[in-house]
Image (cartoon, helix red, strand yellow):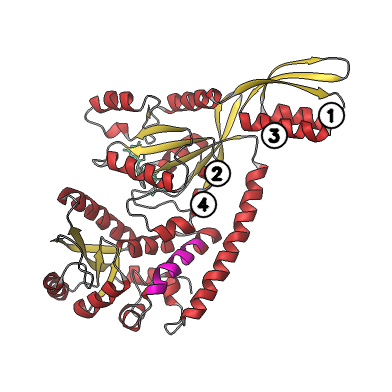
Amino acid sequence: MRSQTIYTIQKENKKERAIAVGMVMSGTQKRQVEESLDELVLLADTAGADVIAVIMQDRRSADPATMIGSGKVKEVAHLAESEQADLVIFDEDLTPVQVKNLEHEIKKKVIDRSGLILDIFAYHARSHESQIQVELAQLKYYYPRLTRQWKHLSRQEGGIGTRGPGETQLEVDRRLIRKRINRLEDSLKRIEVQRSVRRKKRQGIKKIALVGYTNAGKSSLMNLFANTQLLVEDRLFATLDATIRTAVLSDDQEVLIIDTVGFIRKLPHHLVASFRSTLEESADADILLHVTDLSHSNYEEHIGTVQQVLCDLDLDEKPSIYVFNKIDLLKNRKMIVDLKEKFPNAVFVSALKGIGLEQLKQTIQTELQNKEIEKTFRVPNHNGRLISMIHENTHVLDQNYEEDVTVIQVRGAPQDLFRIDQAMGRIDS
Ligand SMILES: Nc1nc2c(ncn2[C@@H]2O[C@H](COP(=O)(O)OP(=O)(O)OP(=O)(O)O)[C@@H](O)[C@H]2O)c(=O)[nH]1
Ligand SMILES: [Mg+2]
């Protein structure tokens, strides 16, 4: 049932040959479509396909039946035939009807950008949790697309767009799929409970989450920070699972660093929904490090995309530090001056060359301290547990003893001080 096996066979035998199709509609610029298509080519490569031709169609709006219009469909069909393509990948999301019509006309497998991204996720998912998340997203995506036509054309052939739940029985009935979706949702809920228990255990130590566009260098930074050996690849979506490690910021400050899945434009919404719990590791963080590949020509758009996804996840209000990475590749240093004006707390680093790490650590510490406030607790002397809770969760500035109480003056995060207050309240009452 798992997809990986089929993928390996496919990959060893041959790379699939793909044609990429983009649409310039009113309201979009040609340049944007071209950039998005460049990215689609990289995504196809990650999924194991060679894009042998790229086609663009200029239309005021999408044709409901075929997206690109019947004339252009014929052109694509002709090219697919002469170039012996295995599949056609559309950069725009297709409706189930469009897929059906296009496959009928072109006589090749047709998938869209969301399908391709889901396919990559299915192949890369390693942990039990992310496998469930991907399968769930795929089932929800393919559910309305399960037509006889589609099954006949592509499911039996395997390869891109058919990995994951697609290899279950062809004649599987929708009721069974709904059942499977419910089962997976139940499993995810159970995993989420375990995750929140683990999260509770980690209370007290500060958490820093790496977020950013895919391939920005998040895992590279994590490796540098925490001395880990996480997979780093010049590929989109190398990381799918959240990894958490301890890192030392200074002699008296340890933090947890969280590395998670990267974002991309047009991230399929089923995927965001299914990966919510992985992404929400970031929700638990005290600070987000928004990592951007400054050497990328589209870095500004990448920042915008990441901000949008953070907004969708209700994380846009979190304190964040902009980390501009790959400065070793920069030819124009003036960019740095301009960006410093725009993002005053930005840090410029090279995860590859280890440049800027100290500056980043200092900025994180300053940011953490900015959020802290001072407070004095008067704890009954016999309550050792409360006293150690205060020591574990705050910076103790001063400690004095009166007759029956220990007076502890501290600095700490408001939420930690609030929890201590609550614990004190339980003792008083
Ligand atoms: N030149 C240069 N390359 C870098 C730097 N940091 C990372 N890279 C390269 O960029 C590529 C992506 O790095 P990763 O750390 O895997 O990026 P990521 O953000 O974790 O990517 P995903 O997990 O795929 O979203 C790798 O080939 C790295 O070697 C840097 O500072 N300079
Ligand atoms: Mg990564």
Query: Would you call the spot at circle 2 few (<14 residues within 10 Å), some (14-19), or many (20 or more)?
Result: some
Label 4 and label 1: CA atoms lie apart by: 38 Å
Q: Residue at x 53, y 53 (%)?
A: 277
Disc 4 residue type (three-letter) = Thr
Above or below 259: residue 22 = below
Report which residue position mark 1 lands on. Answer: 383
The mark that comes first in sequence, 3 or 1, is: 1
Answer yes or no: disc 2 within 8 Å of ligand 2.
Answer: no
Residue 79 x, y percent position in the rendering: 13, 71
Front position among marks 2 and 3: 3
Above or below 52: residue 246 = above
Q: Quadrant of residue 116?
A: bottom left
Disc 2 residue type (three-letter) = Ile
Q: Secondary structure at mark 4?
A: helix
Report which residue position mark 3 lands on. Answer: 419
Which secondary structure class fits the magenta region best?
helix
Answer yes or no: disc 1 within 8 Å of ligand 2.
Answer: no
Residue 168 x, y percent position in the rendering: 46, 78
Marks 4 and 2 in Cβ contact (< 8 Å): no
Disc 3 residue type (three-letter) = Arg
- Do we see residue 232 in this rendering? no
Label 2 and label 1: CA atoms lie apart by: 33 Å
Label 3 and label 1: CA atoms lie apart by: 16 Å
Instruction: Point out which mark residue 244 bears.
Output: 2
Q: Secondary structure at mark 2?
A: strand
Q: Which residues are magenta?
A: 133-144
Marks 4 and 1 in Cβ contact (< 8 Å): no
Q: Is residue 227 left or right of residue 162?
A: right
